[in-house]
Amino acid sequence: MKMKKQKSMKKYVNIGLILACIIVLLIVPAIRWSNGDSFVGEEPFLFLRLAEDVGLTDNLSYSGRFAAYDWGVPLAMSFAPSILIYLLPFIFGLLSFIIFGLILKKLEISRKVRNMSLLLFLLSPCFVYLFSFTNALFLPLFICLLTFYLFMKKSLWTIPLVLILPLFNVILCASLLIVLFFYMQYNEKKSQNHFILLLLLGVITSILYYGYFIFSAGWPGSFGGFSFDPFKRMVFDLGSSFGLGIFVITLAAIGILVSWKNKYENKFLVASLVFLSIFSYLKQDVLVLLNLFIVVIGGYGLYHMLRIKRWNNDTLKKFVLIIIMCGVAFSCLAQFNNLIEEGPNEGVVKALEFLEKQEQGVVFSDYTRGIWINSAGQPNVMDSQYKFAPEVNERYEDSTNFFYTRDVENASLFIEKYDIKYVWVDEELKEEIWDYDTQGLLFLLEYTNQFNKIYYREGVEIWEVTKEE
Amino acid sequence: MKKEYLILLLIFLVSLGFQLFFSLQVSHYSSDDAYFELRHSEYIEENFKPLIYDEMSYEGNYILNTHVWHYFLALLGLLLPSVLVYKIIPAFLASFVVFFVFIIARHLTKNTKAALFGALISAFIPTYIALTLNQISLYSIYVPLTLLLIYTFFDIRKRIPMFIILSFLVVLLDPMNFLMLLTLLIFLILVIAESIIIRKEMTESIIFFFLLTILINLILFKNLYIDGALGALWQNIPAELYANYFKDFDIIGLIYNIGFLPIVLGFVGLGLALSKENKKEIYLLGAVILSDIVLLILRLIPYEVGVMFLAILLCIASTITIKEIIEYFKLTKVVKYSSLVIVVIMFVTVVSLMIPSVINANDVIDNGVSSEEVDALTWISENSPENSVVLGNVFEGNLILELANRANVIDSQFLLAPDRYYDIDLIYTTESLYKAGVELSKYEVDYIYFSEKTQEMFGIEEITYVSDETCFELVYENEKAKVYEKIC
């Protein structure tokens, strides 16, 4: 009788977690839809455009470039881009959640710790970010989880997955292979051949894929500095866009402290954690994998805190748990809020609709607006997809000079060099770039006859460059 | 009532009398910050809700504050006259320090005479007086509550509900003060390093306090930490003013601000206790002193506040030395003179603290906000259009808001405010009418409030360009302040 009750209880917990997952996955899309907002950020615009127009050249980005992108997500969407852009994050979010649960079960983590880890995973800012909208990381994470699960089950279905993973994200592919190595080394030595096969395939595919990019477009360029602040890079609550929640880190710290004496029994966990922590500091994409380990250790920490025997005072225990749950929920809510508030706002969307109807010509703006400009069918000077793009640093420097120049001649040279037809300025840009209303380009736009304002609504201005007779 | 409690009550009354003697000499308050506290508690009193977005500060600024202190004052304001609420009650609360120093010292030394000595010298800590006298200061309540929190932690097992309540109060009153947080963490490290067994409740309480501080800080200041990372701890103070708030930590400055004897007696006491006893209470006292010094060295706590805490903690630690002296005399042949020696030490210590305390108190009253400044600002409130903007220096912003009831250009609420310090400096010091005009137009300034303090702050006798009568008119003048109206 008791067994039966426990079984039905387990079932309810599982159903409850899946329902919670569905709710978490629907919150951001539902609220943005009800607000009449467009996609979140830049990536969905890029992937939609690429999925609709698969090819080796991109005529709009950087006014024409070799299309050296991570093609995995656009190709997966290309069957029905306008529908899949909404559906894929939800479907793969749910599947990732289920597979993560299966992995924990396979790792023989106790049911309570597993449920707590799943709950922490669900409420982590990383999960909310990845699966609330189409971005570059949600599908690679799903593939990583599935590959790991199938590797544990010794299935050869891992082969096609590792073959396609570099198309999605080569960094995650490399990280996954290293994590698999630790797993093979410490938990499953018999899978050595399986691992070597995957390693070879992963390396060969990556070399072929990126070798072709390098051959066609040269070495990937970069611009901007590296932030050395580990908190800002890795902790969501201190500024990282999909980093770890500070309270989950606290729980993980407790988990590490209480299981420190068993560290030699969990070599896989310790090695992976150390590697992923260092690597995610260097490459933020790896945070999505680190998050998985942190939530498991956090789940263990939470479980430890809940064990009544360990607490001498019940009141303190209740307060501590309330604070922790409030903290975890706060990080999750803050992520919801960030994604709901994220641009483009209505004004930008309307301006893009206007731009779409104009005669085609290069639009100049800050590189953070480049992908939106492309989505309106217009070429840009530069955008945030700077890897393998032509003359990134030169374009960046030229753009910065153009933003701050008041010299008509300099401005004309820039316009001529990049064949600029339109200039896009919005309120946010004004706040970020200029200190006052008549600084640099703003002065030229307003007080010279070189530009003609063709659009001004809801904080967005579009200026057309007037042709000299 | 026992004799020692009568003496303690007497010390409390002396401390209260000292504070009231000075603060009741003037009808106004002595600092710009006092008017910030006054404005916000009055707002709550009238509207039953806090002022989150202040349209007049910086002509529009979000006020990041938990308003717990303001709610407390507003609640009292509904029941009591304002003199009682803003003058007497803060002094009353600030004087409570003597009780908490007494109970902590008695707990540490088990010696009533030494504890009374600690209570007496804590009544005359110069920096504490300089920060709390006639200023409606948050520290009037924050310092006693922090001491009480430390005391509850000594015997946490019996006082958990009190610890929880006090933790909430202390963290909510000043969320960006990390003294207690660092203290508890250093305490934990010290006891682990010394292999001292502590009760599980202590560890649990530390976890609770740590998490509570993080949660409150995240909820309130998340964006601030995102923008400035750990630099947010410096509260977005303009670079030019940074040295005013976070000074270099040096021994000479410490002796000047705390007094030679409390420092010597305090550190000797702490050293003696650490070498003799392996008590967790001593380690806690050591941890809180160490944390305060670390925060001061790292400039993570405003200098005056850090020094004030250090002074109070050294008063507590000095009671250990006094106890040791008393016990030492008991072992010698001069035991009959022991009381005399103690009285002499006490007298010298109190006098050495009393003199700078009186000087500080006089300084607060004489050089704080003057009645002439109040008159000038009151004149503005009565004679200028309601929507006018008044320029004053950074430490006059709250005075302009409260007394003149007009929008300011800058004040000390830096957290989410734009950095305007350089522009204000330029307006007061430039000789160019054009440059000043550009800046004045940028901030839509209608009146320039030019006080004696602004003269001292910028090292100027007069604003040069106001001699242009087509553009500026001197509309009010008294001994310590002038008001110019911009008419062009």
Image (spheres, rainbow, N blue to C red):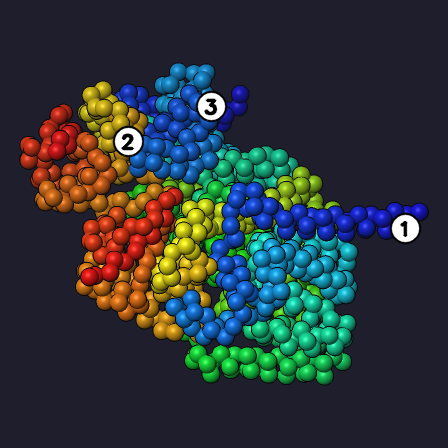
Q: What residue is at 58 percent from the left and 57 percent from the top? A: A82
Residue drawn at 19 percent across, 31 percent down: B447
Q: For this rendering, which residue is in front, B13 or B76?
A: B76
Q: Nearer the viewer, mark 3 or mark 2?
A: 2
Q: Which residue is mark 1?
A: A3
Q: Is residue A39 above or below residue A383?
A: above
Residue B118 location, quadrant: top left
For disc 3, the neighbor class at 10 Å (few under 14, some 14 to 19, many from 20) is: few
**For residue B112, which numbered disc appears in the image?**
none
* Chain letter behind tag 1: A
Is residue A396 something that shows in the picture?
yes
Q: Which mark is residue B407?
A: 2
C-alpha distance separating marks 1 and 2: 71 Å
Respond whether the residues carrying marks 3 and 1 are from the same subunit.
no
Mark 1 closeness class: few <14, some 14–19, many ≥20 residues within 10 Å:
few
Q: Are marks 3 and 2 in contact (CB under 8 Å)?
A: no
The amino acid sitting under disc 1 is Met
Quadrant in which the C terminus of chain B is drawn:
top left
Disc number placed over residue B48 in the picture, else none: 3
Q: Position of residue A424 (x, y in %)?
A: 34, 55
Q: Looking at the image, which residue sits at the far right?
A: A1
Kind of residue indicated by mark 2:
Ala
Whole-angstrom CA distance, mark 3 to mark 1, is 56 Å
Residue B384 is left or right of residue A422, and the answer is left
Q: Amino acid at mark 3?
A: Phe
Q: Position of residue A449 (x, y in %)?
A: 20, 54
